[in-house]
Image (tube, rainbow, N blue to C red):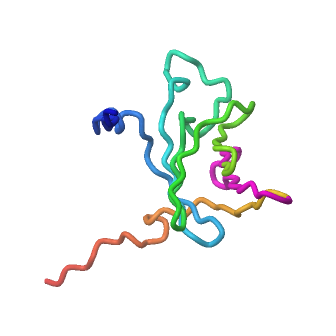
């Protein structure tokens, strides 16, 4: 069988939105939204969400890398593979859940991480004269 060819970098870059940093359950999480066909400018977005909605999201958290497709749920953008669920109802406090075999889904508390500029972490190093 022929191996699938990876997409050229420009095609990926054209669909990718800037990554957003969060802290979920005390650990850093990076969310990368990718635009899908529903994000074509010719198709109006009925949700008028403050965050552009994508065809999928890649979440990098702990030792996981999850690619979750956009759901068909009404309302704000949400993404799920049937086991993991990520919702942008409030982009500063997204909802992140894990469906468990028994019992209620496990919720992970998430907050948008402060930007390095806000915390002063990216200050220019002092130069000695």
Q: Which residues are magenta?
A: 86-103
Q: Residue furthest left?
A: 129
Apparent side of residue 53 relative to residue 124 in the rendered image (left or right)? right
Question: Which residue sits at x=66%, y=51%?
Answer: 84
Please identify the residue farthest to the front as the structure is shown: 1
In the rendering, at what x and y percent does residue 64 appear? 53, 61
Specify whether 21 is left or right of 72. Answer: left
Residue 73, position in %: x, y? 73, 33
- Residue 97 shown in magenta: yes
Left or right, 73 with reference to 1: right
Q: Quadrant of residue 4?
A: top left
> Residue at coordinates 17% horizontally, 84% vertically from top-left?
128
Identified at 35% across, 72% down, the residue is 123
Q: Is residue 48 above or below residue 28?
A: above
Residue furthest to the top in view is 42
Across and down, in percent, residue 96 comes to: 68, 55
Q: Is residue 78 left or right of residue 58?
A: right
Residue at (51, 48) in percent of width and height:
58
Measuring from the top left, give residue 93's x and y in whole percent: 67, 55
Residue 45 drawn above or below residue 109? above
Task: Using the rendered view, name the quadrant where residue 109 is placed.
Answer: bottom right
Q: Main secondary structure of the magenta part?
A: loop
Q: In the rendered view of the protein, which quadrant contains the C terminus?
A: bottom left
Question: Residue lying farthest bottom?
Answer: 128
């Amino acid at each position: 069988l022929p191996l699938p060819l990876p997409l050229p970098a420009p095609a990926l870059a054209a669909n990718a939105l800037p990554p957003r940093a969060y802290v979920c359950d005390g650990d850093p999480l990076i969310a990368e939204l990718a635009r899908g066909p529903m994000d074509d400018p010719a198709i109006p977005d009925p949700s008028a969400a403050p965050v552009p909605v994508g065809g999928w999201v890649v979440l990098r958290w702990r030792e996981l890398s999850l690619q979750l497709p956009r759901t068909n749920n009404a309302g704000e953008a949400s993404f799920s593979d049937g086991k993991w669920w990520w919702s942008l109802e409030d982009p500063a406090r997204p909802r992140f859940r894990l469906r468990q075999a028994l019992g209620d889904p496990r919720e992970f508390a998430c907050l948008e991480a402060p930007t390095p500029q806000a915390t002063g972490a990216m200050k220019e190093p002092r130069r000695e004269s």
